[in-house]
Amino acid sequence: MDASASAPLFRMEGVSKRYGGVNALTEADLTVEAGRIHGVLGENGAGKSTLMKIMSGVVQPDEGRMVLDGREVVFANPAAANSAGIVCIFQELSLVPDLSVAENICISNPPRRFGLIDSRAQRRIAEEALARAGGEDIHPLAPVKDLPLSRRQLVEIAKALVRNPRILILDEATSALTAADVRRVFAVLKRLRAEGLALLYISHRMAEIAELADECTVFRNGRNVGTFKAGAKTDTEIVEMMIGREYSHAFPPKPAPRAAGETPALEVRSLSWNNRLKDISLSVRAGEIVGLGGLDGQGQRELLLALFGVLRGTSGEILLDGRKASLASPNDAKRGKVGMALIPEDRKTEGLMLPMSVRDNLSMASLARFSRGGIVDRAAESQAIDEMIALLAIKTDGTAVPVGTLSGGNQQKIVIAKWLMTKPKVILLNDPTRGIDVGTKAEIYQLLRKLADAGAAILFYSTDYDELVGCCDRVLVLYDGAVGRVLAGAEITERALVGSALNIGGGQAEAGTPALAGAGQ
Amino acid sequence: MTDRALSTGGTGDWRYWLGEQRGTLLALAVFVVMFVIYTGNHQAGFSADVITTAANKGVLLALVAMAQTFVVLTAGIDLSIGMIFVLCNCVASYIVVGTAFEATLGVIGVLLTGLACGAINGLIVIYGRLQPIVTTIATGAAFFGLALLIRPFPGGEVQEDLADFLTGQLPGGIPASAVALLVVVLVIWIPFRRSMLGRVVYAVGSSEPAAYMSGLDIRRAKFAAYTLAGLLAAIGGLFLTFVTYTGEASSANANTYTLNSIAAVVLGGVSLFGGRGSAIGAIFGALVFRTIGDLLFVFDFDPLWQPLFLGIVLLVSVCLGSFRLIRLRNRLDLFG
């Protein structure tokens, strides 16, 4: 099919979307043409997923318009976008585990005879779709829950194809696939392009974009910062386009690097789990802030959970102050001689009991410290709570008010304070500044440095590269569940972080870094 | 397409079918074995009367277990099911009387009562966003209160021709109640299982987020599940009236049938986590559960021990449902 037609298939003009006070997308433009693969790049929070959600009707834009076939369109829900021919394959799979492959593929509109589902026709459709998606060897009657992740991804593509899309959006569609499966999917995508489909391909694997895409668009801070022909720019130039956010954070000065040789407070040797964490080794000394970088979902969260005793079936060793620790629950991690604390990712579900009071929340993790024979010493508890409120400058109208009534920044301070009350020696933080105001962020940076200076060992995951640059003594960049690269001291720059997060090496990749072109494992 | 894709119609199919029907087939096998032991040791032996009596008792729980299945498939639970059953029994003892025509209208009235009760449950669960367990405990209390109000003392009557026909024997000694149950399966369950609606009910129970992301109508599916549960409980209530010839607002019956329906569902291979199992499995689960009681009787088990023994069977069968949790590798998923 000739793709050089004049009017583009789909155009997005000046689309903006705000969540609360945050601009997720600002006056974004994008043009998608039939018979082309359009690659979309951008770092964490650059607006890629918001863009897709708008195109596929999951969220509605605040401003701007979308034009399909020269006519303006508005999608109230995913079904509306689907019927207009825009189908999205989301990163979080949308397959129903207990239904069979064929049932999943035909789920939104199964073939029917006399009002009942025609399972023969359904099976035929599923087989055809699987063949088109490169999954001929998947049995259409197999329950989806028995399939490995890589097969599920192919089923997901087949499911999208039966909706006869004109525009197919793929979000990190290959992140769960083996190298061989990636080849198959690519062949399928190229065939679909030849059939005249428009494909929007979102990936953080530069090599994939280079191989597949006809055009590329880079997003930064919710804006389209440039669209260019694939191959027109080098990897370095693309990274250059992705960075350059404006920041205005105040970071405390970093101390001189500490002497090596000291026993680390936390040491991890060859930690692996469930194919999500692969042979991770690291050490954090007392007084050190070590950052975890990389794109979202490369195993950072799992690593912190594994250290805190949440995951079952981990292999490898965890040493605290040089002694081997076996942690089977957060309670073990908290109680040990070297107490650990994990500041969780989602304060509303894992950090706080929102309807309970400030006081109850603050002493939740450290009640054992104030208890004598099972009775809580209220005076000691109150004193410790007052100290914490003063230390973190928490703004609250007394300690009896429900935590849910405080501002986001103050809630986050309570989560941190709650764990500081256990007097931890090792502090794990999972993206602690997400969604809080700049002022509170700066206070948290100061606090972290103060805690480190007082002897705590801190492991700090952040999706904000600027924080890693400003706060950390060393940064481990994770890629695909393994430590891709270690940056220390002056090496920690945003460019190095983005480059190693995308796994394009920058010439200094360490031995063991996955090969760039492998696009797989 | 390759040859491989075309060849999938052959050998492997029965394994997937077996995998899906495993729970149902297991319950069927256990039932057959137990029932053979039961009739083999019964004084009257394998006679039409023994079987008809067993069928009449078994069909009551089977219908209520079918009702429970609809809700459990959505990953919910209906603790009001026994109360709807008893309420419909009380209603039937007033209106399923008189001429054949009047009795037919009465039957329709009873079925509508059950549908209404189920619809109320569904609406509260969907629009009130309450947990099914809380909702149905509360509505169940109300349904039972209503039953007590209309039938303070056991009594009433039922159209005897209809009752005798449905609880008697067809030519050849086949129990009519078993045939009636088969008709219910063919008219309600099979079409449900093969409809779009049924598909969505399974999808919602298996993974509600995935169902939502697939653009399915979750609310309609849940509403249908609760309403159909009410309908099946009403059919059960009708049958109770045909068996007993009276209406009685029995709180013991209501509670026992609610609990036993859960045991039956689990014994029949329906997952309490939703999305897996079949009402046919639940029917055999119900028959297994009933036959346990009959076996205890035949072997002269001390009747005082029966409730304890059945309670333990209930406990064990519910525990079977949690085996899945042993394999979880992220402890946070335990609370999901």
Image (tube, coloured by chain):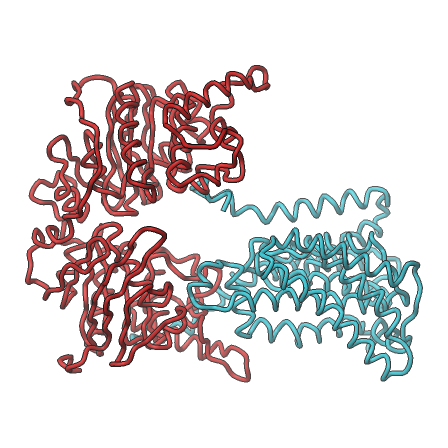
Chain colours: A red, B cyan
Percent position of residue B47, x then y: 85, 67
Instruction: Using residue A514 as the reference point, say whether residue B23 is left or right of it.
Output: right
Q: Position of residue B22 (x, y in %)?
A: 56, 60
Q: Nearer the viewer, residue A344 or B41?
A: A344
From the viewer's perspective, tell me whether residue A261 is left or right of residue B33.
left
| Depth order, front residue of B26/A97 | A97
Vertical comparison of B95 with A338: above or below: below
Residue found at x 19% / y 63%? A39
Quadrant (top left/top right/bottom left/bottom right) for the N terminus of chain A? bottom left
Please name whichever residue, A340 or A183, is drawn nearer the observer in this view of the structure: A340
At 13% across and 80% down in the image, what residue appears? A4
- Farthest residue to the front: give it: A397
Q: Residue at x 28, y 34 (%)?
A: A460
Residue at figure coordinates x 59%, y 18% from the top left: A375
Relative image position of residue A281 (x, y in whole percent): 25, 32
Residue A371: image quadrant is top right
The vertical placement of A494 against B80, above or below, is above
Examine the rendered structure and indicate whether residue A393 appears above or below residue A404: above
Expressed as whole percent of the image width and height from the top left, the position of residue A262 reads 22, 17
- Counting the numbered discs, the total is 0
Q: Is residue B28 visible?
A: no
Visible in this render: residue A341? yes
Considering depth in this image, is A396 or B319 the residue closer to the camera?
Answer: A396
